[in-house]
Image (cartoon, helix red, strand yellow):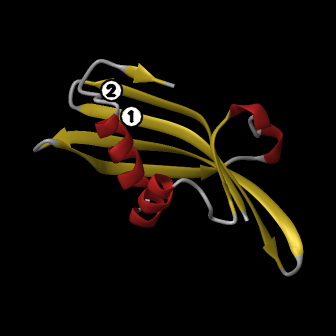
């Protein structure tokens, strides 16, 4: 199994963060390799000293609109990544991004891509 994060853009406006990214996943189904991509937009609110995901949207990407392979940010092979990435993935993608916002010290008016 292969999974990656592409074209990630984090925009913080005051106590709200907008996170947009595209994910590619390749897996085996009935002996065949199947690849698909989704794009998502999550909205976070900084409240009581922590980032909380308050809205999440995900959409399948048509193959003709897949971003190039050189746009990935993080790769996982057979579910293996850094210890931090594994912990965050177990907690869910919203928690992973909230942790990233916290680690980056993003506290308003910043954009990270």
> Residue 104: x percent and y percent?
34, 31
Contact (Cβ within 8 Å) of mark 1 with mark 2: yes
> Residue 111: x percent and y percent?
41, 21
> Residue 91: x percent and y percent?
39, 64
Horizontal side of 22 relative to 13 (left or right) equals right
Placement of the N terminus among the 4 image quadrants: bottom right
Mark 1 vs mark 2: which is more N-terminal?
Answer: 2
Quarter of the image for residue 34 reads: bottom right
Q: Nearer the viewer, residue 89 or 64?
A: 89
Q: Nearer the viewer, residue 84 or 111?
A: 84
Circle on res. 12? 2
Q: Where does label 1 land, which residue?
A: 18
* Farthest residue, direction front: 83
Mark 1 Cα within 10 Å, few/some/many (few <14, many 20+)? some
Q: Is residue 68 visible?
A: no
* Farthest residue, direction bottom: 30
- Is 31 placed above or below 89 here? below
């Amino acid at each position: 199994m292969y999974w990656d994060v592409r074209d990630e853009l984090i925009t913080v406006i005051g106590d709200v963060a907008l996170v947009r990214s595209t994910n590619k996943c390749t897996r085996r189904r009935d002996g065949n390799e199947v690849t698909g991509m989704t794009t998502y937009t999550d909205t976070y609110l900084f409240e009581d000293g922590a980032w909380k995901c308050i809205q999440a949207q995900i959409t399948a990407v048509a193959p003709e609109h897949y971003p190039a392979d050189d746009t990935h940010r993080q790769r996982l092979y057979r579910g293996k990544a850094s210890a931090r990435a594994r912990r965050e993935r177990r907690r869910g993608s919203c928690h992973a991004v909230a942790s990233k916002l916290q680690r980056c010290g993003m506290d308003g008016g910043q954009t990270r891509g």
